[in-house]
Image: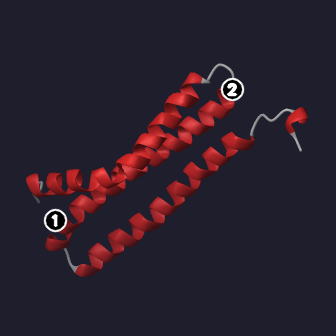
């Protein structure tokens, strides 16, 4: 099985612009977390981990979406459906982990005086 080449790259770079706004927001979040690392190291680490996981997952899904037509043309429909189902469940679990880390960053290391 050979690499699909230009069609997959065209699909990949054609689909990524739709994800750019959220990728940019996550990148800014990572930069801000790193900038505040000394004051809030645990919070920053959790946020950077969560955002980085989400960024990588988004890029992997974009690659999967770009290669699916090529893969579908060479495999039985059942294989493609299985692959997409597994990818969907995997993305859901990865997203849950990423969101869990981001939410933990919001609530970790709170001082007693800050509680309402």
Q: Is residue 90 left or right of residue 3?
A: right
Residue 40's mark?
Answer: 2
Q: Residue furthest top?
A: 38
Q: Is residue 103 left or right of residue 60?
A: right
Residue 48, located in which quarter of the rendered image?
top right
Q: Is residue 72 above or below residue 78?
A: above
Q: Position of residue 110 (x, y in %)?
A: 80, 35
Residue plotted at (48% across, 45% down): 53
Q: Is residue 91 left or right of residue 106?
A: left
Q: Position of residue 92 (x, y in %)?
A: 50, 62
Q: Is residue 72 above or below residue 113?
A: below
Q: Is residue 57 above or below residue 69?
A: above
Give the crowd class for mark 1: few <14, some 14-19, many >=20 residues within 10 Å: some
Identify the image quadrant of the N terminus: bottom left
Q: How many marks?
A: 2
What's the distance in space between the residues labelled 2 and 1, CA to CA? 46 Å
**Contact between labelled residues 1 and 2, with CB atoms less than 8 Å apart:** no
Q: Position of residue 60 (x, y in %)?
A: 35, 52
Give SS at disc 2: loop
Q: Name the residue that disc number 1 marks.
A: 70
Whether residue 56 can be seen here: no
Residue 67, located in which quarter of the rendered image?
bottom left
Model colouring: secondary structure
Give SS at disc 1: helix
Residue plotted at (41% across, 41% down): 24
Q: Position of residue 90 (x, y in %)?
A: 46, 61
Identify the image quadrant of the C terminus: top right
Residue plotted at (48% across, 41% down): 26
Q: Earlier in the sequence, mark 2 or mark 1?
A: 2
């Amino acid at each position: 099985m050979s690499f699909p080449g230009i069609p997959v790259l065209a699909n990949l770079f054609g689909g990524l612009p739709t994800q750019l706004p959220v990728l940019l927001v996550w990148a800014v979040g990572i930069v801000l977390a790193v900038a505040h690392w000394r004051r809030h190291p645990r919070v920053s680490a959790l946020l950077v981990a969560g955002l980085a996981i989400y960024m990588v997952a988004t890029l992997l899904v974009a690659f999967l979406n770009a290669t699916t037509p090529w893969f579908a043309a060479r495999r039985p429909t059942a294989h493609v459906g299985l692959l997409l189902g597994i990818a969907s469940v995997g993305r859901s679990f990865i997203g849950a982990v990423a969101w869990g880390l981001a939410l933990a960053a919001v609530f970790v290391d709170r001082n007693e005086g800050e509680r309402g």
